[in-house]
Image (cartoon, rainbow, N blue to C red):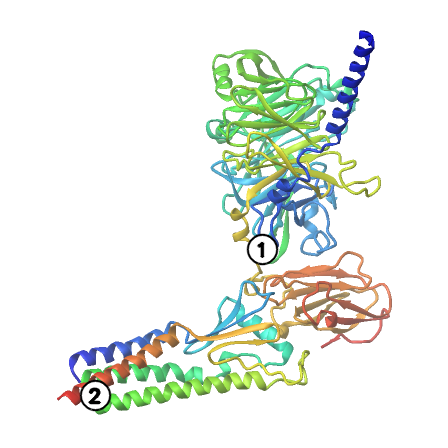
């Protein structure tokens, strides 16, 4: 690896630091009764409201359809994620420092695999919240209706329009992995040239 | 044809034409109903009004909150009157807000709202309003639109000239309309002249939290002190009070107090009063009064009884107060935005007298006195007068200003608004009102910075303006466009109670600062239950305390047993919601006081004495969710001495 690509990789790894400060994902719901908006952020270590009481109020709304309460403490992934990302940052910086090509490909493969696994995991959580409904206590039950929010994009569920999109931290993570691939591409081109 | 016949026919034709035209002119209503006026007051669904208007409720004891220019009523704020609709004055938390040295007073007559000011401009923090009958001043917090404080005024009878604000809300000033024996004692009414006095009260306002306390009272001769306004700009440091009944009549004032061709505007130098207080000239005199305020942490009122006040006697304090003669039983006293002109509305005259503040200072310096009244120097009328507005209609009462050099005076008897120019004193426009105009209001119109776009006329009579509701009618406010040279009537709208004065302020100085919810974690009510885990029922002798929670869409507990006849049950209901516009109600069958309307994060308490044996339902009265109809519960009431234990779910 030349020094330029090592710098790019280092910057890419450091971008991940932003995921500790900015939410990974944003899920908002819109309805006429919520002109001020209602939404949650999925952060690296927790889930919280976009306004102060949004998580509480979203849980309150969800209880009518029998959705489980979103309790951040009960989601184990949120406990591991800071460590996993920390490992990716440090190992990314180490690869940039040493400049080994094999190490770069291993790191990139690991990062990609973890990112895909994370998205799949997120999908299954959404699936679980949307399908695993408490039919015994739900006041509103509509035949055939499930409430899984989309991974990307917008979906209408009863009176709510739900929009799910990556937020600041998620976008930074995407840029980070992209810079990793840019490094790999520069390397590959250099190898071919020499 | 005979010339005489032609002349007669011609005359008849002219007369007929004249009659026809005048008939048409009478039928034509001014502007009202035209599409221009409709567009000017139209606020599209979902859009906001440009101004808030706060109208006094008069005999309703409340304050009406309106939008301008639409004239839409948003809310009635209970201030001096109990309000079973939300429990104000009935709940354990609020009933002491209405505590006075006469006991619990469930009603009053509220006349003059006044917005707090910073540098002479309304700042949107608080609204003060007087209770005329059982003399008090209230402060409404404009974050919550709730009554935050009520202070009683001792040594006063008829708190009419109140509450007027100094330039930076240093003081709320009040005067007694009815002079009374001070201190109160058992004397013959015939001894009015020797035993009766008036007081001018200065209430200090804490600049941070708005809390009020009586700083001092000035003892003045026994006249009727009617209205007031504080100086501003160059006249900051002075306050002005009209008075009538300088005849000192104590019966049939209609005749006996209308004899003198001039009464007074009292000019009080309150900066001088502060100096005298600092020098220890104040005397401690008896004067019991209650000060009640809401503690926003406990959501409960706190009452304190104070026993004395500090008096300043003009006899010991030269240069404290002067009288300016003003025709004739003057009512309103209004200070123009520059602070130079002091306008007295000669209630029984056809003239508005305008005193000049700078001429007044000069007259004092040159000692142009024509005598004294109870030791207070009376200034020479010609030495203080800047001008007289004649042709101002009959019965001029109140004047507001547009900040563009014009003044607008209400004429009660001729039922009109008269616009005149400051400095030249000429009348430039007039417009009729329907009917018998009392106060008028321009947003900021009594401040240093009027927003001179609209004028609201507050009429005393309504007659045929709306669909009839029998002998008792709503009162009518009228919105007048004053942005151009000619005034234009835009809108009639009905008002709460009988509005006297009103205040207006641009919406952006209030709307963005309003509270949406109370923070549950800041709730320090002694009987709060901030989670369902804390919901419970406890017996203490014959008192049963129910620590109840509400959240969409249930009460916890909702089944209560073990209550016995003879018990006093306190439902302490905490609303666990933290979402805007989700209050819950609580109504108990047979409760002899009111319901509760509990805002998110607050705790309110209903006292209930069961009168019958059986099982009685309670339910939520505020439609809170799709399952609101399911939000209910039961209390079982057993006979006295029964062994049924306290039980709840």
Name the residue carrying label 1: B296
Q: Is residue A158 left or right of residue B123?
A: right
Cα distance between the residues tagged 1 and 2: 68 Å
Residue found at x 57% / y 70%: A57
Q: Position of residue B208 (x, y in %)?
A: 50, 46
Classify mark 2: helix, strand or loop. helix
Q: Is residue B53 visible?
A: no
Q: Nearer the viewer, mark 1 or mark 2?
A: 2
In the rendered image of this protein, does residue A54 appear above or below residue B325?
below
Tags 1 and 2 on a common chain? no
Q: Position of residue B236 (x, y in %)?
A: 49, 30
Residue nearest the observer in this picture, B527 or A35: A35
Residue found at x 84% / y 66%: B565
Tell me the tag on residue A188: 2
Q: Are marks 1 and 2 in contact (CB under 8 Å)?
A: no
Image mark 1: chain: B
């Amino acid at each position: 690896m030349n020094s330029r690509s090592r710098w790019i990789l280092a910057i890419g790894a450091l971008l991940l630091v932003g995921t500790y400060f900015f939410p990974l994902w944003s899920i908002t719901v819109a309805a006429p009764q919520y002109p001020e908006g209602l939404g949650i952020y999925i952060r690296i270590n927790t889930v919280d409201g976009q306004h102060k009481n949004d998580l509480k109020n979203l849980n309150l709304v969800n209880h009518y359809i029998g959705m489980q309460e979103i309790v951040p403490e009960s989601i184990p992934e949120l406990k591991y994620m800071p460590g996993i990302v920390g490992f990716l940052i440090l190992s990314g910086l180490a690869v940039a420092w040493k400049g080994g090509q094999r190490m770069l490909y291993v790191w990139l493969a690991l990062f990609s695999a973890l990112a895909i696994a994370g998205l799949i995991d997120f999908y299954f959580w959404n699936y679980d919240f949307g399908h695993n409904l408490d039919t015994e206590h739900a006041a509103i039950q509509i035949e055939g209706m499930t409430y899984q929010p989309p991974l990307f994009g917008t979906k209408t569920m009863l009176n709510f329009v739900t929009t799910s999109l990556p937020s600041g931290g998620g976008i930074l993570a995407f840029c980070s992995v992209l810079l990793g691939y840019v490094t790999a591409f520069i390397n590959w081109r250099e190898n071919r040239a020499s | 044809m005979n010339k005489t016949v032609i002349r007669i026919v011609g005359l008849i034709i002219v007369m007929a034409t004249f009659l026809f035209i005048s008939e048409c002119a009478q039928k034509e209503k001014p502007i009202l109903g035209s599409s221009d006026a409709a567009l000017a007051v139209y606020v599209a669904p979902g859009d906001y009004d440009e101004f808030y208007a706060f109208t006094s409720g008069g005999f309703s004891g409340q304050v009406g909150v309106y939008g301008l220019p639409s004239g839409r009523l948003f809310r009635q704020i209970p201030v001096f009157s109990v309000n079973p609709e939300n429990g104000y004055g009935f709940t354990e938390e609020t009933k002491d807000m209405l505590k006075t040295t006469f006991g619990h007073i469930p009603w009053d007559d509220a006349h003059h709202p006044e917005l707090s000011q910073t540098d002479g401009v309304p700042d949107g923090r608080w609204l003060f309003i007087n209770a005329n009958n059982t003399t008090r001043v209230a402060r409404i917090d404009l974050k919550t639109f709730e009554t935050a404080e009520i202070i009683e005024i001792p040594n006063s009878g008829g708190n009419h000239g109140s509450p007027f604000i100094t330039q930076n809300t240093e003081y709320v000033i009040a005067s007694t309309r009815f002079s009374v024996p001070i201190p109160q004692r058992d004397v013959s009414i015939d001894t009015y002249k020797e035993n009766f006095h008036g007081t001018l009260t200065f209430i200090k306002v804490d600049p941070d939290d708005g809390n009020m306390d009586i700083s001092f009272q000035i003892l003045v001769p026994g006249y009727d002190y009617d209205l007031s306004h504080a100086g501003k700009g160059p006249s900051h440091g002075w306050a002005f009070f009209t008075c009538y009944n300088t005849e000192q009549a104590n019966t049939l004032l209609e005749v006996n107090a209308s004899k003198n061709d001039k009464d007074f505007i009292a000019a009080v130098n309150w900066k001088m009063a502060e100096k005298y207080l600092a020098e220890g000239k104040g005397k401690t005199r008896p004067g019991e009064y209650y000060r009640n305020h809401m503690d926003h942490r406990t959501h409960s009122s706190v009452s304190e009884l104070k026993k004395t006040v500090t008096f300043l006697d003009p006899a010991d304090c030269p240069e404290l107060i002067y009288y300016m003669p003003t025709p004739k039983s003057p009512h309103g006293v209004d200070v123009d935005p520059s602070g130079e002109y002091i306008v007295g509305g000669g209630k029984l005259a056809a003239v508005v007298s305008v005193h000049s503040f700078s001429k007044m200072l000069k007259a004092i310096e040159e000692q142009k006195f024509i005598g004294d009244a109870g030791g207070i120097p009376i200034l020479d009328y010609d030495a203080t007068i800047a001008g007289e507005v004649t042709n101002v209609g009959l019965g001029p009462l109140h004047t507001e200003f547009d900040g563009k050099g014009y003044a607008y005076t209400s004429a009660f008897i001729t039922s009109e608004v008269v616009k005149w120019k400051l400095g030249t004193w000429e009348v430039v426009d007039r417009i009729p009102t329907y009917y018998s105009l009392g106060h008028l209001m321009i947003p900021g119109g009594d401040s240093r910075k009027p927003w001179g776009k609209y004028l609201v006329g507050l009429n005393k009579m309504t007659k045929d303006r709306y669909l009839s509701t029998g002998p008792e009618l709503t009162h009518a406010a009228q919105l007048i466009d004053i942005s151009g040279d000619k005034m234009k009537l835009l809108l009639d709208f009905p008002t709460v109670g009988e509005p006297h004065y009103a205040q207006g302020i641009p919406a952006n100085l209030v709307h963005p600062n309003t509270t949406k919810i109370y923070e549950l974690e800041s709730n320090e009510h002694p009987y709060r239950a901030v989670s369902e885990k804390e919901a419970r029922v406890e017996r203490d002798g014959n008192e049963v305390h129910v620590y109840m929670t509400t959240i969409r869409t249930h009460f916890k507990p909702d089944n209560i047993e073990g209550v016995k006849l003879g018990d006093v049950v306190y439902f302490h209901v905490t609303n666990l919601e933290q979402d805007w516009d989700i209050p819950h109600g609580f109504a108990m069958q047979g409760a002899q006081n009111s319901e509760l309307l509990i805002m998110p994060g607050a705790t309110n308490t209903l006292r209930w004495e069961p009168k019958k044996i059986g099982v009685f339902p309670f339910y939520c009265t505020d439609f809170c969710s799709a399952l609101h109809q399911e939000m209910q519960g039961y209390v079982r009431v057993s006979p006295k001495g029964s062994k049924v234990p306290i039980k709840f779910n």
